[in-house]
Each structure stands twice: as C-alpha cells, then as structure tokens.
Image (cartoon, rainbow, N blue to C red):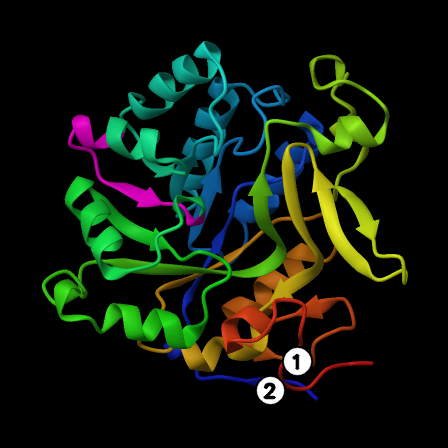
C-alpha cells in the first residue's frame, strides 16, 4: 500500500555527499541526474578518505556551479577525520573558496570557519546532544544542524524546546539523515584495505571496487555492518520515508545518502511525500527510540 502526505508540509530533500569511492564518469553522470531532479540542496565533497581523488577540488567547484545554475543550493562538505598536513591544506582551500557554504564535519573545521566569521552547516559527526552544545555551535556560526543519526524524534523535539534555544530556534535549520546506510564511526585504520589483507598505506585505492561498500554479516548471516574505507556504516539501510509526517514543524530537510541502486526513484518519493512499507533490509528504529536495527510500522517481509 502506498500513501502520500501533504506535500506542502513535507521537509525539503537534500542529497548528501557521496560516501563511497566512484569513478569520475559515474560521479559526473550522477550529478547531471541530480541537476534535473527535485532535490533542493546538494552536498559535494569527500568526507571519508582524502586518498579518494577521482574528483579534484576544481571538479567539485565546477559541479557546484552547474548545480547552482540548475537551481540547487550547494554546500561543500569537508573530511570527518583530518589526519595529515595535506588534509589541513585541503581544509584551507575548502574554507576560503568564498562561493559556497561549507559543512563542518569536525570541530576543527567549525572553529576555522568561525574564525573567518563564515556561517556553516554542522554535520552529524559533530555529535551535538544537548542544547548547550547546539547553542555554542550557533555562536560559532552554525546555521543548519544535521542531527546525529542515532537521535530520536522525541529527543530532538525535547532538545529544541529548551529555553536556552528560544532565541535561535526559528533561525536554526534542522536536517535529519533519512535514507541510506548510516555512517556510524570512523577509524585511523582502513577496514576495506584490511579486508583485502592490505596495509592502509598500500591500499591501492581498493575502495573503488566496492561502490556500495563491503557488507559484513553476523554468524547468523544477518547484515551487520558495511565497511567503507575508514568508515563503518549500518548493515541495513535507514529509511524514514514513512515518518515524514512526524517531522512537520520540526525538520527542515531530510538527507538522502547516494547509492547506485534506485536512488533517483527514492529521491522522487521523498520529494512527493510518498510512503510505502519498509523492505526487509530497511530500518527506522532510532527515530522511534528503538534499537537502530528495528523496524517500526508496516514492512514487506
């Protein structure tokens, strides 16, 4: 059974940064599709591993300009884990380009942007869990907050109703990760390289062979995690497609994380407020104060 919510009340759709390592041609084709899509916001940039260089910084800027001309709001996303002087130089290039807002995925980036008095998007990896930390980042320049993926609707609603946020609540945009494999953790080690018995320094960019990451299963054969370079993701896909009605008046944007499988169809469904039963490999537990691997509501067995 498929249902639709009032489209005028549905949060706007954002396309998150691509978390996997795709060839340049695939990236170009994907973003051309996004330019013609109903997405409102598009995030561009490498957030997982600085070795992934199919797109140069100039490529990202050129793509950003193309998407902006197509009517999209473009945000450039920075790395979540900065590990070298080269990463710091890339950060400086990102934060001084002067054309597009930046998503800060670590506190160092947030402080760097604040020192230049630049507004920014606070990524989910900043792990803000209470009103004091949200207010502090607002004072540094955060104007949109991507909520940590494990927070529930009830937690978010309670947090935003705290008196400390009264003066900024109407000005702070809220974004929720709503579709894709949840980014859960980052490490100094590369799990994809390790899965091929390679050292991180000699990974030979093997991530490019896994456009949706490498699935790790439990002893019972159930999806457990997706290995994506130094990033660990949920084994099941998170899908809040049926929960858009619960975000009305609370959430401004829902973020969809790109993958090669039926992504454009899913983007259209979210944009038009289409609800449908969850598939067997989809979950929505966190939003409902349940364990993340649980399903709440109708599903397809």
Q: Quadrant of residue 175?
A: bottom left
Q: Is residue 42 magenta?
A: no
Q: Quick one: 1 or 64, which is closer to the camera?
A: 1
Which is more N-terminal, label 2 or label 1?
2
Please indicate whether residue 18 sits to the left or right of residue 193 in the image: left
Q: Is residue 53 visible?
A: yes
Residue farthest to the left? 167
Residue 276 badge: 1
Residue under the image location 65 percent in, 49 percent down: 233
Q: Is residue 122 magenta?
A: yes
| Element under disc 2 | strand
Give neighbour class at mark 1: few <14, some 14-19, many 20+ (Cα, 10 Å).
Answer: some
Do residues under tags 1 and 2 come within 8 Å of each other at their CB atoms? yes
Residue under the image location 79 percent in, 36 percent down: 210
Q: Which residue is mark 2?
A: 3
Q: Position of residue 151 (x, y in %)?
A: 45, 65
Residue under the image location 54 percent in, 69 percent down: 286
Residue farthest to the right? 220
Q: Position of residue 159 (x, y in %)?
A: 28, 68
Q: Is residue 272 visible?
A: no
Give neighbour class at mark 2: few <14, some 14-19, many 20+ (Cα, 10 Å).
Answer: few
The quarter of the picture where the C terminus appears is: bottom right
State the extent of the magenta-drawn residues as a range.
113-124
């Amino acid at each position: 059974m498929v249902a639709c919510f009032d489209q005028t009340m549905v949060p706007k759709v954002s396309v998150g940064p691509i978390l996997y390592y795709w060839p340049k041609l695939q990236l170009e084709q994907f973003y051309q599709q996004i330019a013609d899509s109903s997405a409102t916001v598009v995030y561009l940039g490498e957030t997982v591993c600085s070795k992934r260089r199919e797109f140069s910084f100039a490529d990202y800027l050129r793509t950003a300009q193309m998407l902006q001309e197509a009517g999209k709001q473009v945000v450039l996303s920075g790395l979540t884990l900065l590990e070298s002087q080269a990463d710091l130089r890339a950060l400086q290039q990102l934060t001084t380009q002067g054309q597009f807002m930046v998503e800060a995925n670590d506190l160092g980036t947030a402080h760097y942007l604040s020192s230049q008095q630049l507004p920014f998007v606070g990524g989910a990896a900043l792990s803000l869990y209470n009103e004091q930390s949200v207010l502090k980042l607002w004072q540094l320049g955060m104007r949109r907050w991507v909520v940590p993926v494990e927070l529930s609707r009830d937690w978010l609603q309670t947090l935003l109703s705290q008196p400390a946020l009264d003066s900024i609540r109407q000005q702070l945009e809220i974004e929720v990760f709503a579709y894709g494999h949840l980014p859960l953790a980052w490490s100094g080690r590369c799990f994809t390289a390790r899965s091929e018995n390679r050292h991180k320094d000699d990974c030979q960019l093997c991530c490019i062979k896994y456009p949706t990451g490498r699935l790790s299963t439990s002893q019972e054969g159930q999806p457990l995690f997706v290995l994506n370079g130094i990033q660990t993701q949920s084994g099941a896909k998170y899908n809040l497609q049926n929960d858009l009605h619960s975000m009305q008046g609370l959430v401004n944007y829902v973020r969809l994380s790109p993958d090669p499988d039926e992504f454009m169809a899913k983007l259209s469904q979210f944009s038009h407020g289409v609800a449908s039963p969850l598939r067997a490999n989809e979950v929505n537990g966190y939003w409902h104060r349940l364990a993340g691997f649980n399903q709440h509501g109708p599903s397809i067995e």
